[in-house]
Image: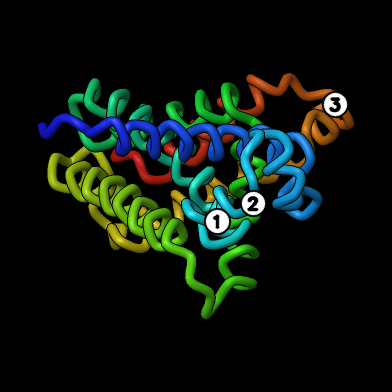
Amino acid sequence: MKELTRQEKERLERENIIVSTAEDLFCKYGFEKVSMDNLAKECEFTKRTIYRYFTCKEDLFFAVSLRGYKNLFKMIQSESQKGNTGFEKIRLSYYAYYNYFCNFPEMVQLTNTCGVIKSNSEGMNIPYRDKFTDLDKCLFEELIKIFREGKTDGSIRSDLEISTLALSSIFVVTGFFQMLSLSGNTYTNYFGLDKEAFIKFTIEMLLDSFKHQ
């Protein structure tokens, strides 16, 4: 690998400072309530400096989300490799997402708004939105590949159309954790549920729906 020049290292360091500061502010106050003035003051850079690295606040939002998704992707890849069958790998992947939810709840809540930010930023020049979308697509493709592996090795039901099953299952899991991140402990406390037991029950119920019996 080519060694970075001092200028390149300084650029990366500044970019990391900006993204880390934006992550802290977005997670604490929400995307809408943070201005570029707030960000510039907090990271001690001028707005002009920030705009050298990011085209707009939306670009920064997707840079933050991209960092979170990279962590999620690594966690899923690391855990899924421990499985011997496609079904076991999917199960481990879903529990990796659960682990991500437990360790980075503010990031999960922040990325819940990705769809809204994408819709509101159509037609804008947002390089990190494209990078985020590409990684999101890679994550889905990786999970769909594991579902196909499960159908091939017989650990996942053969009567289900695999692409529809994979997309539906992923949608249910991510939607479930998004709702949990939005409600906090309100839902589980209201019904007197043990949160951890409730989450595990839901994951296992979903897994049982497509496991080969």
The picture places residue 115, in percent across and down from the top left corner, at 59, 63
Kindly indicate whether the residue at mark 1 contacts the one at mark 2 (C-beta within 8 angstroms): yes
Q: Amino acid at mark 3?
A: Asn
Q: Does residue 197 sit above or below 157 in this rendering?
A: above
| Rendering coords of residue 120 (x, y %) | 64, 72
State the mark number for residue 51: 1
Q: Is residue 104 above or below residue 157?
A: above
> Which residue position is annotated with label 3?
189
Above or below 48: residue 99:
above
Q: Is residue 30 visible?
A: yes
Residue at position x 57%, y 30% from top? 101
- Can you name the residue that lies furthest to the bottom here? 123
Residue at horizontal 42 percent and vertical 62 percent from the top: 127
Around disc 1, counting alpha carbons within 10 Å, would you say few (fewer than 14), some (14 to 19), or many (20 or more)? some
Q: Which residue is mark 2?
A: 47
In the image, which is nearer the foreground, mark 1 or mark 3? 1
* Element marked by disc 1: helix
